[in-house]
Image: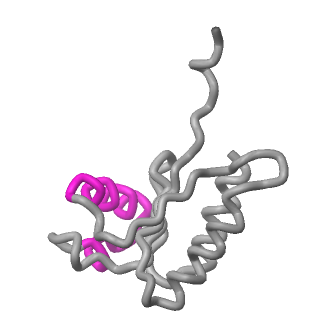
Amino acid sequence: MFRSFAKSRNVVTLFHSPSSAVSKQILSVLSKNKETTAAKVFDLEVIEAPPTKDQLRALRSYTTSAGGGADTFVAASGADVVRPMVVDWLNGRAVVGDDLPGVQALVEELKKD
């Protein structure tokens, strides 16, 4: 009866560049932290393709609201997007490039939720 009130699990997307050492490190951090001993913290989606137009629109709003320079990594076409990029869709947060401490901070926030 109350199943509809259950909290849905967050989906975190890594726009991954397999040729990048930093992207591989970030993938490792996310993979290790997606589960705690008690429960799954988030679902990890790894995408090697560029973001879609709709995803780019959302990413612009996430980075603009965070005070980041959205135009520095989100160009008019998805092919020009800097990767790796980690996106927390549920909470509207994105970490771009080689910001490993930013990814770790995002993961810690997800563990608190």
**Start and end of the magenta stretch?**
53-74
Q: Residue at x 52, y 56 (%)?
A: 12
Q: How many marks?
A: 0
Q: Does residue 16 sit above or below 33 in this rendering?
A: below
The residue positioned 31% from the left and 54% from the top of the image is 58
Image side of residue 98 versus residue 58, left or right: right
Q: Position of residue 63 (x, y in %)?
A: 38, 64
Along the line of sight, the residue nearer the viewer: 26 or 76: 26
Magenta residue check for 72: yes
The chief SS type of the magenta part is: helix
Q: Quadrant of residue 73?
A: bottom left
Q: Residue at x 65, y 62 (%)?
A: 107
Q: Residue 96: image x %, image y %?
A: 44, 75
Specify whether 53 is left or right of 42.
left
Q: Is residue 56 magenta?
A: yes
Query: Which part of the image, by quadrant, shows the N terminus?
Result: top right
Q: How is the image coloured?
A: one colour
Quarter-of-image position of residue 85:
bottom left
The outermost residue toward the right is 37
- The C terminus lies in which quarter of the figure? top right
